Image (spheres, rainbow, N blue to C red):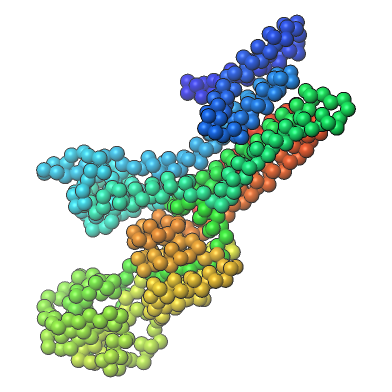
């Protein structure tokens, strides 16, 4: 309550004093028969709300800025006092101050999502040094050190889980309330909340390089990158304000040369009304606030815009180009099927895994991981290992020539494959022993749960062209595209091929192109597209740095949320511009001819600004 009165004390005092003055003025004229006393009483009611505005006007004047909302309000109210319209002079400043307070509250509401993100920043890290855990600032922890996190504490830095298992709430980072279980060896990110037992992690990044630090930096800097509409309004206000000030002077002076019974006070009042109406604060405040609210709503949904300008761009997107692995799919390869014809299955798998240990390819890693649980104790003598990029591995195992890889490697060794193989569109790892077909292992990537939903909703929201560009083989890309309902796809592409394709799409001026990816190889295309969207949880640092928008949850469906938020923001900003200009033009015209007084001017300024601000913060209520 004390804070309430402290914040609103000047407005409350001014309102009560103005009300008393008006009552005396209307019901006890004897007290105000003395004009000096009447003037002093209204000045006393004026000062609580006027002093802050006059102070700002003076500071701006010292900085070389005369044409601003503070000077407009000051001159308008001085003029109202000069013409004897004391109640209206106080009312203009009072309602202007009320409007400013309400606008501050609206800005605070828009900032709430971003402030909550900043509050996620951990204050301490419990690090193991000299055989005991000590509390230090996260910024002082080095890579490789062990950190302990108690239940209910935030993870201070990015790291690898050393404990057997931990459960974490990632809502602050991703907007998702579903808890995540992370096992030993899994990645833990700064800002996650440990919900159960005490866990230990090994730090993999300095705090300044952590996911959380980058997120905070992106959101804080986002408001510095202005949208074209926002920049236009600011330039417009700088030109518009001196012009309307000159017009107000002309409304006061010019009639002197044309009107027979010219009354200076009468036309000065009209000029002052025009001056109050013309104040551009409805546009200058509500439009940046609209973009700010859009960025806040997006961050609450796990979508980080690196600038307000990208809200404008993505609202116009009609073409979306997807990378496949790690973007539409999970990027996690798993063995789906094992078929062998020469040797027993466990021996076949154990031998294949013994060879694949020499490769870092995701498919090789998946096979090795799958074979770990085999009860097969035979040791294989693997020799003369040669990995051929884009083909597979050649080697000698127990004096037998072994080839493990794709169909190209089989063709190189003239291995005859069964006819049915050519009719199956899966990721095949073929195995040949002494140039004879010995079997195959199907290793496939899983499609993300929201990928199909994303494609469907993108089509519903006016995206008329959806394309997959992938470095993977054609059968795998075709299968993924078919499952997701995408008809246009291109496979076996290098990074430069992806850029060439995006460039080709951009040559059509009707296209607004978004590229969605996660890997280092996607970075050139992300940078070249009209808007680059990176998957932030598993995406490479380079992809995240280059992208304009980062999806923290890695869910493709969030792209639809980003488009919806951007379009709603654009719609609200257009509404604000149209409403503010129409009302101001109407009341300016009426005021010029004496048909609108200071009360109408107050509505045209403060009322319109407030309505525009309230309209802007509707963006905050957009949820996925």
Residue that extends furthest to the front in the rendered view of this protein: 257
Residue 98 lies, in percent from the top left, at 60, 28
Residue 227 in picture, x, y percent from top left? 54, 51
78 left or right, relative to 437: right
Does residue 76 show up?
A: yes
Q: Could you say which is closer to the camera, residue 543 or residue 618?
A: 543
In the rendered view, does 320 fall on the left or right side of 274?
left
Q: Position of residue 210 (x, y in %)?
A: 31, 51
Residue 534 spot, x, y in % from top left: 41, 60
What residue appears at the point 46 percent right and 74 percent down from the top-left corner? 500
State the image quarter where residue 68 is shown: top right
**At 43% from the left edge and 67% from the top edge, which residue is drawn?**
525
Q: Which of the 4 image quadrants contains residue 34?
A: top right
Residue 602 falls left or right of residue 326 = right
**Location of residue 67 with respect to 383 vertically, above or below:** above
In the displayed structure, 109 sits above or below 352; it is: above
Q: How many marks?
A: 0
Note whether residue 460 is visible. no
The residue at the point 75 percent across, 26 percent down is 269
Asked whether 144 or 62 is in front, the reply is 62
Nearer-the-camera pick, 42 or 296:
42
């Amino acid at each position: 309550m004390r804070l309430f009165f402290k914040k609103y004390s000047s407005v409350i005092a001014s309102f009560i004093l103005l009300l008393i003055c008006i009552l005396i003025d209307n019901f006890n004229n004897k007290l105000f028969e003395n004009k000096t006393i009447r003037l002093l009483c209204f000045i006393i009611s004026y000062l609580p709300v006027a002093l802050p505005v006059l102070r700002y006007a003076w500071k701006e004047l010292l900085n070389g800025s005369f044409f601003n909302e503070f000077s407009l309000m000051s001159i308008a109210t001085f003029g109202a006092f000069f013409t004897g319209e004391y109640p209206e002079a106080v009312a203009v400043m009072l309602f202007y101050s009320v409007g400013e307070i309400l606008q501050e509250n609206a800005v605070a509401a828009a900032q709430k999502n971003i402030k909550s993100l900043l509050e996620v920043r951990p204050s301490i890290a419990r690090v193991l040094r000299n055989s005991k855990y000590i509390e230090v600032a996260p910024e002082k922890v080095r890579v490789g050190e062990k950190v302990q996190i108690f239940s209910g504490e935030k993870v201070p830095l990015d790291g690898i889980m050393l404990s057997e298992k931990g459960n974490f709430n990632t809502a602050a980072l991703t907007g998702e309330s579903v808890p995540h279980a992370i096992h030993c060896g899994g990645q833990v990110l700064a800002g996650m909340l440990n919900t159960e037992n005490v866990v230990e992690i090994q730090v993999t990044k300095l705090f300044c390089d952590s996911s959380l630090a980058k997120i905070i930096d992106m959101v804080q800097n986002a408001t510095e990158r202005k949208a074209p509409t926002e920049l236009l309004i600011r330039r417009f206000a700088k030109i518009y304000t001196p012009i309307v000030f000159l017009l107000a002077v002309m409304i006061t002076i010019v009639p002197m040369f044309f009107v027979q019974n010219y009354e200076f006070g009468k036309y000065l009042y009209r000029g002052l009304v025009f001056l109050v109406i013309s104040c551009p604060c409805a546009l200058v405040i509500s439009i940046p606030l609209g973009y700010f609210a859009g960025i806040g709503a997006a961050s609450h949904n796990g979508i980080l815009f690196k600038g307000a300008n990208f809200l404008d761009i993505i609202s116009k997107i009609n073409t979306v180009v997807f990378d496949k692995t790690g973007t539409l799919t999970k990027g996690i390869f798993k063995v789906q099927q094992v078929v062998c014809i020469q040797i027993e299955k466990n021996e076949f798998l154990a031998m294949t895994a013994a060879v694949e240990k020499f490769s870092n390819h995701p498919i090789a890693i998946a096979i090795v991981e799958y074979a770990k649980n085999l009860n097969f104790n035979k040791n294989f003598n693997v020799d003369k290992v040669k990995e051929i990029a884009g083909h597979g591995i050649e080697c000698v195992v127990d004096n037998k020539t072994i080839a493990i890889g794709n169909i190209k490697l089989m063709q190189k060794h003239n291995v005859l494959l069964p006819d049915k193989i050519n009719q199956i569109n899966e990721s095949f790892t073929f195995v040949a022993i002494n140039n004879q077909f010995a079997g195959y292992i199907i290793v496939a990537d899983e499609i993300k749960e929201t990928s199909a939903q994303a494609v469907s909703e993108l089509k519903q929201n006016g995206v008329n062209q959806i394309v997959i560009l992938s470095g993977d083989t054609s059968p795998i890309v075709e299968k993924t595209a078919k499952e997701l309902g995408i008809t246009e796809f291109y496979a076996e592409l290098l990074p430069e091929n992806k850029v060439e394709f995006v460039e080709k799409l951009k040559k059509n001026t009707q296209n607004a192109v978004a590229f969605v990816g996660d890997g280092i190889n996607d970075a050139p295309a992300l940078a070249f597209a009209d808007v680059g969207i990176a998957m932030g949880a598993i995406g490479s640092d380079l992809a995240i740095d280059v992208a304009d928008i980062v999806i923290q949850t890695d869910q493709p469906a969030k792209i639809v949320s980003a488009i919806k938020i951007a379009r709603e923001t654009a719609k609200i900003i257009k509404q604000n511009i149209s409403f503010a200009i129409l009302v101001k033009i109407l009341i300016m015209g009426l005021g010029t001819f004496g048909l609108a007084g200071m009360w109408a001017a107050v509505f045209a300024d403060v009322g319109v600004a407030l309505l525009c601000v309230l309209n802007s913060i509707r963006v905050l209520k957009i949820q996925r």
